Amino acid sequence: MLRYRIIPVTPFAQNCCLLWDDAMREAVLTDPGGDLERVLGIVAQEGVRLEAVWLTHAHIDHAGAAAEVARRMSVPIIGPHPGDQFWIDALPEQSKMFGFPRAETFTPDRWLHDGDQLRLGTLHFDVRHCPGHTPGHVVFHQAEARRCWVGDVLFAGSIGRTDFPGGNHQQLIDSITHKLWPMGDDTVFIPGHGPESTFGEERRSNPFVGGT
Ligand SMILES: [Zn+2]
Ligand SMILES: [Zn+2]
């Protein structure tokens, strides 16, 4: 069974998440942007074995500590999509700009593409490429548990910013309506910031994509 624990990190309260398969005790961390001592403390507390880092996109608050986790825990970095290469290269500048501890660049052990599958213990996740907030943004969908990790594509009551380099508003709307909505109204999504919601609730009430 899929279990997860949301761990808000960095001054941006980014939802880093520890996901694990209860049967196998295998775990991954999504978007470890920072606050690594606390994050790794929770991994130890849950008694799970960390297998990988999964990245939705390469903004500093999501990817800032990815290289350090990979090195310290000897795990691969998986994702995002190659469209975010320039954001990975810019991690040291991003950390300076936002006053974060110096972030290291890295080369993902595996780039992700639309339609890829990821395994965690006995569980399978579908990868969808959802550009718009960043060109290489991906989301992780676990169909049986009806859960989706969407990074900064969609929030409860809002959508991701598109005013950064490589951002594109129409592309973001298309990603939400063509890639996320088909997962079903009862799918709970875990956004990069703020509380969980369902796609159905956002289709009803989100001022940016309501009624789509
Ligand atoms: Zn972002
Ligand atoms: Zn973010």
Image (cartoon, grey):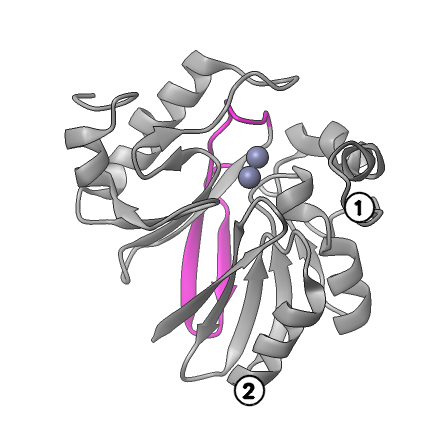
What residue does disc 1 label?
A: 107
Ligand 1 quadrant? top right
> With respect to residue 117, does 28 lie above or below?
below
Please provide percent x and percent y for residue 204: 14, 31
- Residue 153: percent from the left, percent from the top? 44, 33
Left or right? Give the position of 109 relative to 46: right
Q: Secondary structure at mark 1?
A: loop
- Residue identifier under label 2: 47
Residue at (50%, 83%) from the top-left corner? 25
Q: Secondary structure at mark 2?
A: loop
The mark found on residue 134 in the picture is none
Please state the extent of the stretch shown in magenta in the rendering: 113-135
At a point 54% along the width and 49% down the height, the residue shown is 14
Residue 206 position by quadrant: top left
Q: Amino acid at mark 1?
A: Thr
Q: Is residue 202 above or below residue 210?
A: below
Q: How many marks?
A: 2
The residue lying at 75 percent from left, 72 percent from top is: 73
In front here: 77 or 209? 209
